[in-house]
Each structure stands twice: as structure tokens, then as C-alpha cells.
Amino acid sequence: MARTYTLSRPTTRSSRTRQPPVSAEPRLVRLGKRKVAVVETKGEPGVAGPKALPSLFRTVYTMKFALKRAARGDFRVGPLLARWPNGADQPMTSWTGLWALPVPPGTRALPALETEHPVRLETWDYGGRVAEILHVGPWSEEARSIERLHDFIARSGYEVTGPHEEEYLTTPKAKIQKTIIRYPVRKRAAARRR
């Protein structure tokens, strides 16, 4: 099988960007652009996700090990991300899920694999500033953390400009689940004029 992916420069473990520790209190942080491999699902996350995620992980790990074998660099496969662009206004059975794994910034293409669910390369642009909170506990109990985050955003003079995003720091089977809940934000128009 021919490899159909390239990097503009080798990526090493030392070139990873370090993020500050995540807080259980809402906070504003700066995030730029992030290259990700993405698989899209429709429907309830607990049903649709497990069907599509093997395609995503297979694609990213195939790329990782091919780069390592070719001595062209290595990268750590980071935590799973998910965006729910229509989660606020649709029943869960109709949700669109964009599940993603970060890939090196110089990635221009992904391995061409035959997978059950197509995986594509995207750049997620956060626009510079995001509001986030660490939710500790089951996903079924995220509502309180989401409410705290939205209150913080409003009190801070910001507004949400993009989809609800989650970064899963633990596996679904972890004894205590940890999830970063995040929204891209910008200053509200009234706050910008002051």
C-alpha cells in the first residue's frame, strides 16, 4: 500500500506545545489552530461513537507508526476530542458528532485506508480565545459544569462563537471520568465598545 501522507517537517516529542494545567474552575485560555483527524457521526454519542472511533484510531496510529518506521519523527496521540455542533438544539438521537484526534501541525494528508467510516483531515481554528472547565464525573452529569461555564462566559463579558467541544482526559471505563468542556469565545459587542 502506498503512503499518501506527508509532513512539512519532522515532528518530535520535544516540539509538542505544553498547555497549562486544567482547572475545575472556569477559565479563559488562548488556543490557536489545531490539525486533527476527524470522523463524523450522527445519533446518540454512546451508540454512534463506538462504531466510528475504531476507524479514527486506526488511521492516526497507522500514520504514527509509519512515520516512526521511516525515521521521520514521532508524535504522541493526544486525548480524544469531540464537537457537537447541533447539540444545543437537537435531541441527542439527532446529534452530529465530530470526533477528532490531534495530528502533527505539518500533516498535509492522512493514510488512505479502507475503513468503515471515512476519516478526514481538518484544521480546527479556535480564534485565539476559549473558555473551558474541567468536569470531573460521568458525562450524564455535565449539565452543571456546562451551566457554570456559560455563566462564567457571560459574567466575563464574552459570548460563545463556536460549537460545544469536549476533550476526554480519561477513557469511558475510568473510575472517575475527566472531561474538558470548551467553547470558542469573543468579547461581546457591548463589552468591546467600552
Image (cartoon, grey):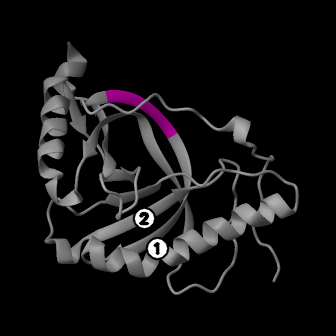
**Residues drawn in magenta:** 28-32
Vertical placement of 92 versus 83: above or below?
A: below
> Helix, strand or loop at disc 1?
helix
On residue 187, the disc is: none
Q: Residue at x 52, y 59 (%)?
A: 101
Dividing the picture into quarters, in which one does residue 152 lie? top left
Front-most of residues 137 and 7: 137
Check the picture and name the quadrant holding the N terminus.
Answer: bottom right
Q: Residue at x 71, y 41 (%)?
A: 13
Contact? badges 2 and 1 (CB < 8 Å): yes
On residue 99, the disc is: 2
Q: Which residue is mark 1?
A: 53
**Mark with earlier residue (2, 1):** 1
Question: In this orientation, does residue 185 appear?
Answer: yes
Residue 58 screen position, x and y as percent: 60, 74
Main SS, magenta region, reads strand
Q: How much space separates mark 2 and mark 1, taking CA atoms?
A: 8 Å
Q: Residue at x 40, y 54 (%)?
A: 170
> Helix, strand or loop at disc 2?
strand
Residue 83 screen position, x and y as percent: 35, 58
Check the picture and name the quadrant holding the C terminus.
Answer: top left
Task: Point out the residue furthest to the top here.
Answer: 194
Residue 172 screen position, x and y as percent: 35, 63
Question: In this orientation, does residue 119 appear?
Answer: no
The amino acid on which the numbered mark 1 sits, given as a three-letter code, is Leu
Task: Point out the residue furthest to the right here.
Answer: 71
User: In the rendered structure, does residue 105 fall within the stretch colored magenta?
Assistant: no
